Amino acid sequence: MVNELDPVAGDLVLDLATGTGDSAKAIVRKGIRVVGLDISLEMLKLARKKIPDDSYQALSGSAYAVPVRAETFSAVTCAFGIRNMPETPKALKEICRVMKKGGRLVLLEFSMPAGFINGPYVFYLRKVLPFIAGLFSDREAYDFLGESIEKFYRPDEFSQIIIDAGFSKCEKRRLSLGCVYIHKAYKG
């Protein structure tokens, strides 16, 4: 995702649903300033400890109402978080609002693969992953993960929702046999 971002010196990037800051840390390593936005204060505290660099700022808030003025960010990233925003079109419109003209949106998200891999992948999501996770942590969280992946938009449909939110074009790239996609869009 960070490689798809094509950061430029002087960029200010919003890392949406930043969590503990793994994506933000990789962007900061490229010499780019990052604002990590998350609804969870506890996650932001962990991110701040992980990224003590002055190029990183943690901001508490929602993707539905980002607490910044319009056209603030050169780029917006989100790794495996947009799927957890039930009002996805609303979040994408808000992302478009806070992004500068010519800005880039790069989303990394799970997807349901097509073809022969679909059946084994569904079995893995519904049975294997929750079972293994249940041995070490909260099985319900992994049941939710599988359900949210299965219910999320298919790649073509998601690309159209991104365009409908105000982006001029959306490119998608399949990874991991279609279990993950990168969606890269631009604000015209």
Image: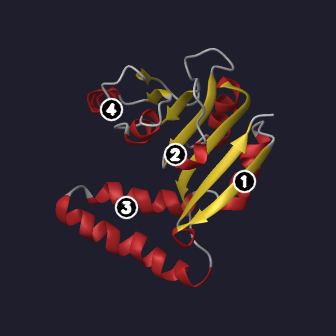
Find numbered disc 1 in the image and state the secondary structure of the residue it sits on: strand
Please name which of the two marks, 2 or 3, marks the residue nearer to the observer.
2
Q: Nearer the viewer, residue 11 or 180?
A: 11
Asked if disc 2 and disc 1 are in contact, CB closer than 8 Å, the reply is no
159 vs 67, left or right, is: right
Cα separation, mark 4 vs mark 1, equals 29 Å
Q: Quadrant of the C terminus?
A: top right
Residue 2: mark: 2
Counting from the top left corner in percent of width and height, residue 185 is at 71, 44
87 vs 111: above or below = above
| Other residues around mark 2 within 10 Å, as few (<14) / some (14–19) / many (≥20) | some
The span from disc 2 to disc 4 (Cα, nearest Å) is 17 Å
Q: Quadrant of residue 93?
A: top right
Q: Earlier in the sequence, mark 2 or mark 1?
A: 2
How many residues crowd around disc 3 within 10 Å: few (fewer than 14), some, or many (20 or more)?
A: some
Residue designated by label 4: 47
The residue that label 1 is drawn on is: 171
Q: Are marks 4 and 3 in contact (CB under 8 Å)?
A: no
The answer to whether one can see residue 154 in this image is no
Distance from the alpha carbon under mark 4 to that under mark 3? 26 Å
Q: Which residue is tagged 3? A: 143
Q: Residues within 10 Å of mark 1 (few under 14, many from 20)?
A: few
User: Which residue is more in the foreground, 32 or 148?
Assistant: 32
